[in-house]
Amino acid sequence: MSGLVYLGRIAGPGEDVFPTTGPHLDVRVTPQFGAQKGKKIDPQTARSLLQNVLVGDKRTPLVQQQEDQWKWNFPITSPYGQRSAPTKGASTYHQGLDLGIGPENIVYKGTGSFTPGKGYGTLATTDAQGNPYEIQFLHTKPAVASSVESSTVTPATSSDTSSRTEDILKAFLYGAQTREEKKPEKTFQQELKEQLIGGLISQSMNPMGFLSSYSSSDPFLGGRAAATSDYLGGLLG
């Protein structure tokens, strides 16, 4: 499904983990097919892909086609290829394209799978012909994971799950009562009566008849049965 894949945010001053002269975006493109598979190419030859990279709240494309011409909407501060290192620790052969952009959010319009890294992120996507590419975005604070803009679902916490489980049990035991409703307090005799009735009904529809099954020549069992019968008679009477 096509959508907007969140790529993170261009690093601001003090946030960049790479050598830098200031906030900017370094874009690197690697085909995953054909003779150039796995080799970084000049991003300016992949403009049809990079026009889908949108910057800031206005969603300005990195580059866009105007009639027969392509226009880069941000200044190119360091092109692909051989160069003098712009700062200590930077490369002398640039494998990407630097664009002068301040700390802005960036998204990709289309389908893709985004993988975050430390100071960069990698988008796996395809061109209009279905050819696979990887696009890296350096000097960024990447998104945690790839995403298509949609409504946000907040995961339930363990306490929420526990509360919901308690509600379900209460509804089952007490008949759709919510957690705010309290079960009426019962006396010991009422609870004992309910338990005895429940157990006896499961055995016989006639509690007194059930007790008669304890008839025995054993005087101890006979006495227990008679005593229980008298007690139940008082409870059920």
Image (spheres, grey):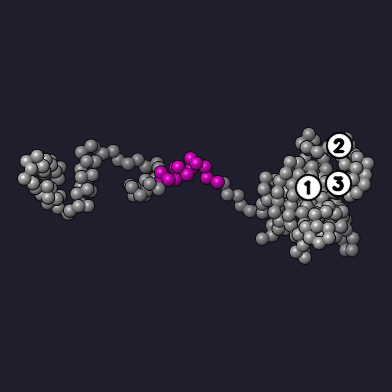
Give amino acid for label 3: Asp
Residue to which mark 2 is pinned = 89
Rendering quarter of residue 88: top right
Name the mark on residue 120: none
Give amino acid for label 2: Gly
Quadrant of the rendering where the C terminus is positioned: top left
Dominant secondary-structure state across the stretch colored magenta: helix
Q: Residue at x 67, y 54 (%)?
A: 148
Rendering quarter of residue 162: top left
- Indicate left or right for 210 with 156 as reference: left
Residue 15 percent across, percent down from the top left: 76, 36
Q: Residue at x 35, y 40 (%)?
A: 182
Q: Residue at x 44, y 42 (%)?
A: 163
Residue 106 percent across, percent down from the top left: 75, 48
From this viewpoint, is residue 24 visible? yes
Name the mark on residue 137: 1
Give amino acid for label 1: Phe
Q: Alpha carbon of mark 2 to alpha carbon of mark 3: how far? A: 16 Å
Residue to which mark 3 is pinned = 98
Using the image, determine if residue 139 lies above or below residue 30. above
Q: Where does the magenta region start and end?
A: 155-167
Is 213 inside the magenta-drawn segment?
Answer: no
Give 158 or 211, whichever is nearer the viewer.
211
Q: Residue furthest bottom?
A: 129
Give 18 or 52, whichever is nearer the viewer.
18
Residue 42 percent across, percent down from the top left: 87, 53
How many labels, in total? Answer: 3
Nearest to N terminus: mark 2 or mark 3: 2
